[in-house]
Amino acid sequence: MALPLNGKLKLRLGMVMIALTVSGCWKVGPDFEQPQVATPKNWRFASSAVRETTNLEWWRLLGDPALNRLIDDAVMNNLDLKIAVANVEQFMGRYGSTRADLFPQIFGTALYERRLISGAESGTVNDLPFQDRDHAVLAGQLTWELDVWGQLRRAKEAASADLFSQVAARDAVVLTVASLVAQTYVNLRALDITLEATRGIIGTLEEETRIAQTRLDMGYSSEIELTQAQTELERRKALLPAFEQQVAETEHALRLLLGKNPGPIPRGRTLNELSIPATPAGLPSDLLRRRPDIQLAEQTLAAATARIGVAQGEYFPKVVLTSMGGQAAQNLDQMFMPGANFWSVGLQLVGPIITAGKIAGQVQSAEAVQRAALANYQRAIITAFQDFEDALIAGQKARERRTFQARRVESVRNYVRLSKLQFDEGYTPYLVVLDSLRQLYDAEIDLIKASNDAFVAAIQAYRAMGGGWIIGAQRKAATPQPRDASIFP
């Protein structure tokens, strides 16, 4: 017995409601779970002081307002950061496009054409004249793929993870930019003081050369003393162009980080006036997991896991609900009349029967990508601990070298004083004086390098921590933010 029209419609609607109910209960493929990674147990301690340290805008601890302004400027104008922000916005759009597949898609259709229909086409006798008719349609069409198996929701999960991975990549750029600006600025100040020390020794050697010339003219010394002084003087002068070149190149590198053309960099305090920021001896493991590169690896793994479900979903038939309704007529004057209304509702199932291994290959590829992403995540975790440990060791050893080099400088200064006294008394040759000046310059340069290394190690330690300051830095510097995905066309 055939159902009446209303009964058939109710049956169809009931089937659709059942499909919608089932579609929200199950998703094909594995769920993402954060992998367990072995971490150093001696770092697993809770310390509010340590947690606050990682959230500091650590570069302000160096005590140089000029550096603070440079980093604020870089976070606002760095070109790599602008690219990263644009990438976030790009993936925001991809996420919105993927999410839209879960909802009905409605399109409008408007059609008008003038037809000349032959008698043979219309089914009339051939000797009748051809029929000249209008054909007009104004309708709306709905297409809705029901996510019965959860494939579309897995695709949404993957797109969401891709979006958050780009957010993590942007945060990594912010972290890198701040660290590089601070490190490059410290290198610049080290070069400045190196250049100053070189000019200082040149001035001293010029005075020594003048004295040697005077002593030679008065017959108190031989020409060899003058030659020794001139040789050492020219040797130190030859260092000036290289140091001046390094200063200019470092300024240009810093300007590039600021998103600006090459030019001079405003200075603040000298290297000796800066303070080395203290770093904690250890960190809770969950804080290092907050690093942007680890977040990026984790979201990449989450996306790869979700795409296994997307690939497996191809094994199941797609359930598509279609509907269309509107006005259609053979003459324009018949449009918008009750007799011109039409509608249709349909349910379509399309599933694979024979694909020659295509779907199996896609699933195999997705599973391999997920395993690679897992290994990359594990490597990121281990690398984070290595970076932090390396920075701690580098900082400790650099401070030790700095202490020893400072003592060496004091000893060599005493050596210079004594060598000059003994030379004036005629107990030592002039070559001893030049040797003491040479050693003093080398000791001062080595002290500058040790100080620079200590600052760089502290900067690298804070970079290895990641830290919650990134969000505040972006907000303070008005970093451009991506627009939200729109639900409208």
Image (spheres, rainbow, N blue to C red):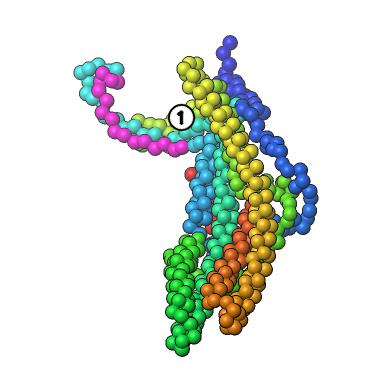
Name the dominant secondary structure of the magenta segment: strand
From the image, which quarter does the N terminus lie in? top right
Residue range highlighted in magenta: 107-122
Whole-percent x, y for residue 162 in the image: 56, 41
Is label 1 in a helix, a strand or a loop? Answer: strand
Whole-percent x, y for residue 355 in the image: 47, 18
- Specify whether 410 is left or right of 5: right
Would you place residue 216 above or below residue 323 in this image? below
- Specify whether 395 is left or right of 9: right
Task: Name, please, the residue furthest toward the bottom.
Answer: 218
| Quarter of the rendering containing residue 274 | bottom right
Whole-percent x, y for residue 376 in the image: 59, 38
Residue at position x 46%, y 87% in the image: 219
| Quarter of the rendering containing residue 394 | bottom right
Whole-percent x, y for residue 153 in the image: 59, 33
Residue at position x 53%, y 35% in the image: 101
Q: Is residue 142 magenta?
A: no
Would you place residue 305 above or below residue 459 in this image? above
Which residue in the structure is indicated by mark 1?
342
